[in-house]
Image (cartoon, helix red, strand yellow):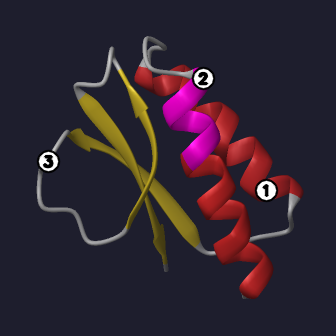
């Protein structure tokens, strides 16, 4: 659990810094691959408008910062 939270935090920093202009689906796939590589299961990633009320942790931004990718445990 602690590793998963740490991974999500690191992905958040990396996603924000490196992928501001990436298409959302491309970034979402990259984040999912990293989470899967850590062995996490039962999660979802959702693309939402920036600032929209989301029930989860923001792990990246895309579309030039207009949308966010939210991580949720299932």
For mark 2, give the secondary structure. helix
Q: Which residue is mark 1?
A: 36
What's the mark number on residue 18?
2
**How far from the left and from the top, in percent, is residue 31?**
65, 42
Residue at the image position 58 percent from the left and 45 percent from the top: 13
Residue at the image position 33 percent from the left and 40 percent from the top: 68
What's the mark number on residue 3?
none
Residue at the image position 56 percent from the left and 69 percent from the top: 43
**How far from the left and from the top, in percent, is residue 25?**
48, 25
**How far from the left and from the top, in percent, is residue 9?**
60, 61
C-alpha span from label 1 to label 3: 26 Å
Nearer to us: label 1 or label 3:
3
For mark 1, give the secondary structure. helix
Magenta: main secondary structure equals helix
How packed mark 2 is, by other alpha carbons closer than 10 Å (few <14, some 14-19, many 20 or more), is: few
Q: Which residues are magenta?
A: 13-18
Residue 14: in magenta span? yes
């Amino acid at each position: 659990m602690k590793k998963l939270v740490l991974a999500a935090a690191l992905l958040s920093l990396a996603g924000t810094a490196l992928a501001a202009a990436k298409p959302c689906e491309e970034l979402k796939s990259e984040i999912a691959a990293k989470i899967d590589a850590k062995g996490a299961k039962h999660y979802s990633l959702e693309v939402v408008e920036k600032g929209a009320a989301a029930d989860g942790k923001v792990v990246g931004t895309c579309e030039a910062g207009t949308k966010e990718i939210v991580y949720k445990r299932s």
